[in-house]
Structure formats: structure tokens, C-alpha cells
Amino acid sequence: METVVPGEVLAEGMDYLPSFGTYRQKDKIVASRLGLVRVDGRVIKLIPLAGAYLPKKNDRIIAKVSDIAISGWRFDINSAYGAMLSTKEATSEYIRRGADLTRWFNVGDYVVTKITNVTSQNLVDLTMKGRGLKKIVGGRIIKINCTKVPRVIGKKGSMISMIKDKTGCSIIIGQNGFVWIKGKADGELKATKAIKMIEEKSHVKGLTDKVNKFLGSDK
């Protein structure tokens, strides 16, 4: 995986297609921003450094099904890395070859999952076998900068516990910056605003008191 700067030529010729963070200039594909370059088949795209998640073994993340293959599911994990969940790691039940895999997970579904391996080829292996790992049903998914995840969680989970208590919502924060919030509509909205406030003002002194005050208001 390579870091590139705006204006850097990523490929020449018409064999590749530009995607997010890139553009075509005559027969060249050029970077439009600072980021990590990823080639997916013929498509070249950039993952912005500010929001790029670097996967680590044993991280618990929230992932979105992006494609279904013969042997399992491909996931978007908010990273330049590709992620794969094999049928063997999806469930304790046996899945026969050729089965309709949408019975378990379909494109667009979100899951709470864990990383079991990160290869030298920038591929991530996932598992659904473990406590708390599950398909997400209902609620809403928001995305925050993964570098702000520790601030949203707080010391010993203090910040996120306060948001849960004040809004009555169930909340799961993935290490990759995807956050699941489920509760009553007004509670979900308030929790979303509080988490976004923390993301935007993570450097502000007395942030905990500010968030507590916001959660106690009628906004």
C-alpha cells in the first residue's frame, strides 16, 4: 500500500478506471488528494489518510457486505485493505458449496465482526465466531474518523457509557470508525449528534462536561 500526493500519476493508458480521489487526465489517472492508493481489479481509488483505518488482528469492527463470492463475503471496512469472511468463519453450521449465501448475509448488510488475520498482500480475514459478533438489525450506522474512536469511548468507557445512559440507546463502536446506534428515534438522533460533537471537538478542554450538558438539554 502506497501513500500518494495530489497531482501524482497513478497509472497510464486506458486499462484502468478512476474512482474516488482520482481523475483522468488524457491517458493518465492522477491523484486529487493525499491518500492511500488501492487497486481493485481495473479500478484505482484513494482512501484519505485522515479517515484511513489500518486493520490489526483481533480488532472488533463493523463491516458492510460489498459483494458475495463463491466461498464467502467481501466487506467494506473503511480501509484500503480488502476484507473477506469465509463460509467456515460465518457460522457454526455447515454451509454446503453452492448454497445461497444471501440466507446469511446479503449485500448492504452490516455486521459486528473480528479480524483474525492481516496478510502481507493487504487482505483481511474476518470471523463471526465469538462473543458479541452478529449481524446488525435495525438502528442506524454512522461513520467517524477512526483516530477519534478512543475519544468517543473515553477513559474506561466513560464517555460512551454516558451517551448510552442519557439516550437509552444501544451503541457499538467499531475500531474502524463505523458506529451502530439503536434506540428510539429521538435517542438515536441525540446520540448521533453527541458522537459527532466529540469527533469535531476532541481537542476541546472540558469536553465531557459539554457533552453531558448537551445530552441533558432538549436540543
Image (cartoon, rainbow, N blue to C red):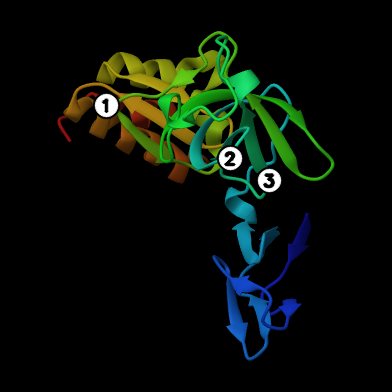
Q: Is mark 2 on a helix, strand or loop?
A: loop
- Which residue does the numbered mark 2 point to in the structure image? 69
Residue 160's spot in the image, x, y percent? 43, 21
Residue 101's spot in the image, x, y percent? 49, 29
User: Which label sits on residue 215?
Assistant: 1
Q: Examine the image and state in which quarter residue 6 appears.
A: bottom right
Counting residues from the start of the chain, the first of labels 1 and 2 encountered is 2
Which amino acid, mark 1?
Answer: Leu
- Neighbour class for label 2 at 10 Å: few (<14), some, many (≥20)? few
Q: In which quarter of the image is the N terminus?
A: bottom right
User: Which label sits on residue 84?
Assistant: none
Report if residue 206 is visible in the image. Answer: no
- Which residue does the numbered mark 3 point to in the structure image? 81
Which amino acid, mark 3?
Answer: Tyr
Q: Residue at x 42, y 34 (%)?
A: 106
Counting residues from the start of the chain, the first of labels 2 and 3 encountered is 2
Q: What element carries label 3?
A: loop
Cα distance in 3D space between marks 2 and 3 = 17 Å
- Between 103 and 159, the one nearer to me in the picture: 103
Q: Which residue is drawn at 60% across and 52% down?
A: 50
Q: Examine the image and state in which quarter residue 209 appears.
A: top left
